[in-house]
Every structure is written in C-alpha cells, then in structure tokens.
Image (cartoon, helix red, strand yellow):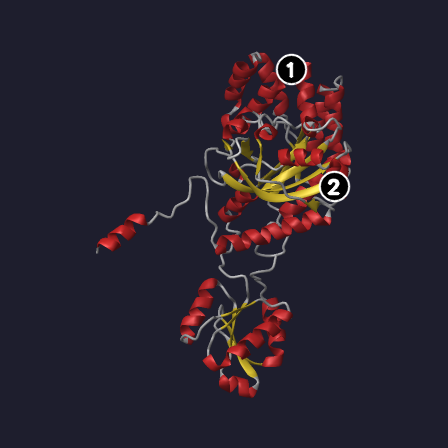
Amino acid sequence: MSSEKELKKKLIEPRTLKGFRDFLPEAMIPREKIIARIVDVYRSYGFCPIDTPVLEYLEILMGKGGDETDKQLYRFTDSGGREVGMRFDLTVPFARFSAQHLAEIGTPFKRYHLAKVWRGENTQAGRYREFMQCDFDTIGTTSVNSDVETALVINDILERVDPRSNATFTKFQIHLNSRKILTGALDKLGLVDKSTPILRALDKLAKIGKDAVVAEMNQTAGASEEQARAILEIASAQGTNDEILEGLEKNLQENDLGTQGVADLRTILDAARAAGAPADRFVIDVSIARGLDYYTGTIFESFLTEYPKLGSVCSGGRYDNLAELYTKQTLPGVGASLGLDRLFAGLEELGMIEKTASTVDVFIPFFDASLSSKYFEIAAGLRRQGIGVELYPEPKKLGAQLKYADKKGIRLAIVVGSDEVRQGVAMLKDLRSGGQEEVKLEALAESILRTLASDPTPQGNA
C-alpha cells in the first residue's frame, strides 16, 4: 500500500502552459493539408525553402518589432552566459540570414519559411503564445513588381485554404495601403518625426475607435487634436478603390513619397485585375498601418469576410531598411506571413474543418490469423497504386475492428478470409454508406479509386 502511495506522489500532472497546446491527429491532418497547399503555391512562384534557429542572440531580435514586441520576447541567459531570445517572427531572422549568407544566395532571392514563433502576449481566439507562421519574402529589389507578386501569392494561398476539397475559397478580402502614403500625410502635417507612435496608434483604430486613437496620438506623440483628426480623416477615406486613390492623389499631390505610394497601389490593382482576381478581392484601406516598425512601403492585411473580428490572417509589406541593421549593403525586401493557427481557428468557426483521425482511405482488418502475409501483400499492392492503407495489427472480432476504423474516419474496409483467398476475391465495405460489394483481388485498386472518385473526401492527400 505504501509503495502505491509513493508512486502516486511521484506522478506529474500532465498539462500544457497557458497559450500553448497539443495537436491531436484530427487537428493535425487538416493543418498538414493546408500547409501542403501553401507550400505548393510558394513553389509555383519560385520561392525556395530555408530554416533558421529558434534561438538568436538577443541583440538580433531586440528593437526590431517595437516596444510591445520587446516586452513579449521570451529571453534568457543560456548556459554559456549569452543573452538569447526565441524568435518572435520569421522576418527578423530572415534579415539576419540574408546579411550573413548574401554571397551564397545572391539577389534577388525568394524564400519561404514555415516554422513556429513565440510571443508572451495575452491569449485570445486564434491567438497563442506559440504559433506557426508561413512566410515568404523577396529581397534584393525595390521593384513594385515584387509587391504585385506578394499580393498575388496572398490571393492564391487563401483561395486554396479549404482542406475539404480543391474548390476555390472566395470568402476573403485583401486590404492594401502604403506606408509611403501615411508618411507623406504625416510630412504635410509636420509630424513625420513622430511617425512611429502615431502609426502604432492608428493601427489600433478598428479595436479602440477614433476618440481613443486621437487621445493616444496626443499622449504618445504630442499630436494636437486637429492634427490627429486630420490623420484619421485621411485614414477613413471611403469609396471605390479608384475614388480613394484619386482623393489621395489630390491630397498628396505636392508630396513625392505619398504620390509614389498611390502609384504603387494603382500598379498592384491593375496587375491583380489582369491576373484574374475578382473585382472586390483587393480593397484600398488607408487605416491599416501595421504595428511593426520596419515597414516602409506597401502593406497588406487579409480578412475572412464571414469572420472579420478574427483579425488579419495573412499580413505583410515592404521593408526596405530592415537588413541594413546587419549589413552595409542595401537589401530591400517585401513579403508576407500567413498565421496558420489564427486561420485554422477561423476555418473551424466557419465549419470548414472536417475532423478525422486517419490519413488513409482504406482499412484491412486482421480477420484470419493465418493470413498475415496475405494482408501485407494486399496492402503493399494498393500502396503502389497510390492508395493509403492501414492494417490492423492483431486479430480481434471483426465488429470491433470495423468500429475502430469507422471512429477514425476511414472510408473503406477490405475483408478477406480463407474462403475469399481461395476464390481470389475480397469484400469491399463502405463504412460510410454501409454498402459492400465482392471484388476480385486484382481489381481492388480500380474499384477503390472509382469509389473514392465518385464521392472524393481524401484523408491523407492535399
């Protein structure tokens, strides 16, 4: 009895930290489908994969994302006495990577990077302290064509995020703005030297409202109420994209930087139309500022139209000066990051995530202990035809095995006993409909593929 008590005392309660979570197969399977589609889009545009360490020297990370981000950094002194931090995004490590490996990678260089990042921020719906970002960037060019391509990649990614099918997803919009426009407006008002706190306040407009933004601009940047209201008037421009751009042109006609920002947005919209994007897909939104300090040009934020309160699921922009912190060579860049966890939370809310605990469509129960080798033979033959198969590891009652397969969401079961082997057939059972048919063993793959094609809900393939 005493030994049992001692054992109980030694047991550690299994739990996860606040803001962190485990992923069971039913969540990981659709996540991996989405990830595979994202990677396919990146590769189709010529972006190449890289990876960087979780830990960076603290000086690499500090001061790159603003005061709030610095507060959220997971930082510590390692066993070697070095001050280190866990990356809070993938862009800052990429800037360091680019400066360090410039001679090897050359420019322009197009990369994608899918990895976890960490921020010690308050948790909420779709927001965690450990989360995955799916980044892509182009460095080494100031051409607006790279901004255009960034917009098109965001569009193509979001069109493919529905893990249930290959149908095009359309219920999203991509909001566009330019820091050049905002900086030009601040220049006209004599506030360009206070742009960082003003733009951080503006970035909170949707969350806290106009009056609170005006108060923050006054308190943190010393902007008068008149100046703050003038900024908000520009940021609140309404109308069609063309109407908003025409108004900005008139307002900023004597400011070269602002005028260039307007021209950049026109170029992006024209190219998006030429590429076949729907007319309402891209929206000029002068209120978006992006809270991070390193953006200098075009900025992007993307929203699910049926769940706007979720916030942006894919954001980014141009950051012409970031890598100059690590190298004397100018390395302009533009890119964006899709927040997989936030997007996944949105898709769950919209009922677009079908939970399944299996990566295969076919199950072979261990029906006859003497037929073990035959089951492996059948499974191997089907896998060579591109069909995923799970073989139960031990003989049990058939009903229990089929219940196991059905619970995991496996669509089809192949039941083979000694009689079936002698006749060269198998029973192909549809666990969803309850129907079954006798199929010759040599025709199994053909029958399975035909059944799946008639009602395609593939488990393991994106």
Q: Is residue 458 above or below residue 50?
A: below
Q: Is residue 55 above or below residue 359?
A: above
The quadrant in which residue 102 appears is: top right
> Cα distance, mark 1 to mark 2?
36 Å
Q: Quarter holding the C terminus?
A: bottom right
Q: Which mark is residue 273?
A: 2
Kind of residue at badge 1: Asp
Residue drawn where x is 52% and y is 14% of the image: 219
Residue drawn where x is 51% and y is 48% of the image: 350
Kind of residue at badge 2: Arg
Residue 93 at what x, y percent from top left?
63, 35
The quadrant in which residue 290 appears is: top right
Q: Residues within 10 Å of mark 2 (few under 14, many from 20)?
A: few
Residue 36 at what x, y percent from top left?
62, 52
Q: Quarter holding the N terminus?
A: bottom left
Q: Which residue occupies the extreme front position in the image? A: 80
Residue 31 at what x, y percent from top left?
55, 51
Q: Is residue 434 above or below residue 117?
A: below
Under circle 1, the secondary element is: helix
Q: Nearer the viewer, residue 445 or 80?
A: 80
Q: Residues within 10 Å of mark 1 (few under 14, many from 20)?
A: few
Q: Which mark is residue 193?
A: 1
